Image (spheres, rainbow, N blue to C red):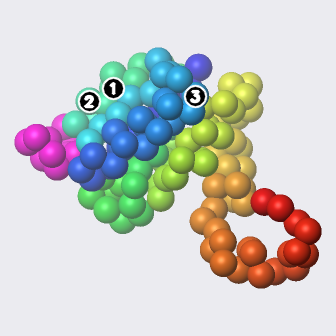
Amino acid sequence: MRNIIIASHAHFAAGINEALELLTGPHENVRVICLFVDGNDDVETICATAVEEAGEGDVIVCTDLFGGSVNNEFTKQMQLHDNVYLITNMNLPLLLQLVFADDDQPTADLLRELASSDDARVKFVNDLLTEGVDDDDEF
């Protein structure tokens, strides 16, 4: 089983995990880290501890913002540990696919696939509705 860490500035990680659990139920392999709230300002220690506590096996860290302090600290952890994989600019479709992913697929291959998937990308619905949609089509 892969271990998943959902980490963010403020309460975004808790909120997106709440939505994830609403749709899928709780997952024992998912840990949430909300930084810069309630005195959680020691990013380096918190991130290092989260990776250590994840235990054996692959650890997938999903962060909120590329180049942000949370992502940057987990980048350091990724460089220190061969079993840590980092994906950023997370969203709910990505997390849904991640929690239901086949454990037999190599983690790096899985993350490359998910990062390039149209299902996990943002969509501008106004354009989707005007691009080749007939009046009889439904969404």
Whether residue 118 is situated above or below residue 128 in the rendered picture: above
Q: Which residue is mark 3?
A: 24
Q: Secondary structure at mark 1?
A: helix
Q: Which residue is mark 2?
A: 49
Identity of the residue drawn at 40% across and 24% down: 54
Q: Would you say residue 83 is visible in this rendering? A: no
Residue bounds of the magenta highlight = 35-45
In front here: 39 or 85? 39
Q: Is residue 73 left or right of residue 82?
A: left
Q: Mark 3 or 2 closer to N-term?
A: 3
Badge 1 density bin: few <14, some 14–19, many ≥20, Cα 10 Å: few
Badge 2 density bin: few <14, some 14–19, many ≥20, Cα 10 Å: few
On the image, the x and y values in percent for residue 74 come to 36, 47
Most extreme residue toward the front is 136
Quadrant of the image containing the C terminus: bottom right
Tell me the number on the disc at residue 52: 1
Identity of the residue drawn at 58% across and 28% down: 24
User: Which secondary structure dominates the residues rendered in magenta?
Assistant: loop
Q: Does the magenta run of residues contain 41?
A: yes
Q: Does the magenta run of residues contain 29?
A: no
On the image, the x and y values in percent for residue 136 come to 91, 68
